[in-house]
Image: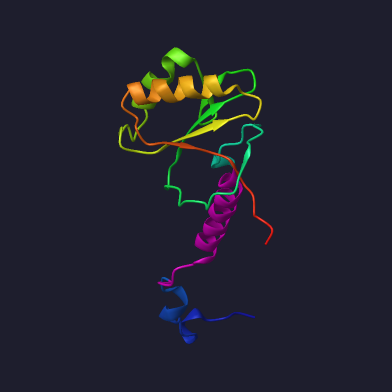
Amino acid sequence: MAISLADTELDDEDFAEAHEINVTPFIDVILVLLIIFMVAAPLSTVDLPIDLPSSTATPQKKPDKPTYVSIKPDLALALGETPVKRVDLVRSLDAMEDASKDRFVFLRADRSVPYGSVMQVMNDLRAAGYLKVALMGLEVREAK
C-alpha cells in the first residue's frame, strides 16, 4: 500500500512563524521581582535596638531618604545602621551620596544616654555645618 505525496496539499500556514509574544515568562519575572522588593523593603529601614523616650509632639513629615545618627546605650554612634567613631561622624556624613549640609539629620538616642552626650553629638554636628538636627522620640497619643 503506497501513498502518493503529490495528492496531498501542504498548507503553508502550518509551517509559518508565529508572531505573537508569549507574555507568561514576562509575568513570571515581574512577579518574582515584586516578591523580592516586598521582602527587601522592610529591610531598608533603620533597625537598631534603641529605647527611645516618648514624645507627645505632633509628628512631622520625614524626607524620602532620612539620615539617622544613633547613640546606643554604650555611647557608641551609628550612621544609619553602620557603626562610626565619634571623630569620623562628620566625615562619614560628608561622604554620603546626598552630602548636603542643608538636609535634616535625625538624632536618635537611647533613653539611658546622658543628656550631656546627646549635646556633645549635637554640638559636633552644628560645628560641622549641619544646622537642621531633629531629635527622635516615640510617638505617644494623649488620652482625651
Give the residue at the far front of this rendering: 144
Q: Is residue 3 above or below residue 22?
A: below
- Quarter of the figure that contains the N terminus: bottom right
Magenta residue span: 18-42
How many numbered marks are there?
Answer: 0
Give the residue at the far right of this rendering: 143
Question: Between residues 1 and 144, which one lies in front from this camera angle?
Answer: 144
Asked which quadrant contains residue 21, the reply is bottom left
Percent across and percent down for residue 134 are 45, 38
Question: Between residues 72 and 91, which one lies in front from this camera angle?
Answer: 72
Percent across and percent down for residue 9 are 46, 85
Q: Residue at x 66, y 25 (%)?
A: 112
Q: Residue at x 59, y 18 (%)?
A: 75
Q: Is residue 95 visible?
A: no
Q: Is residue 114 above or below residue 21?
A: above
For this view, does 101 lie left or right of residue 88?
A: left
Percent across and percent down for residue 97 are 35, 33
- Was residue 39 drawn as part of the magenta stretch in this picture? yes
Q: Is residue 17 visible?
A: yes
For this view, does 139 lie left or right of residue 69?
A: right
- Quarter of the figure that contains the C terminus: bottom right
Give the residue at the far top of this rendering: 87
Q: Residue at x 54, y 41 (%)?
A: 44
Q: Is residue 77 above or below residue 52?
A: above
Main SS class of the magenta portion in the image: helix
Percent across and percent down for residue 60 are 47, 51
Asked which quadrant contains residue 47, the reply is top right
Q: Residue at x 57, y 58 (%)?
A: 31
Question: Between residues 32 and 134, which one lies in front from this camera angle?
Answer: 134
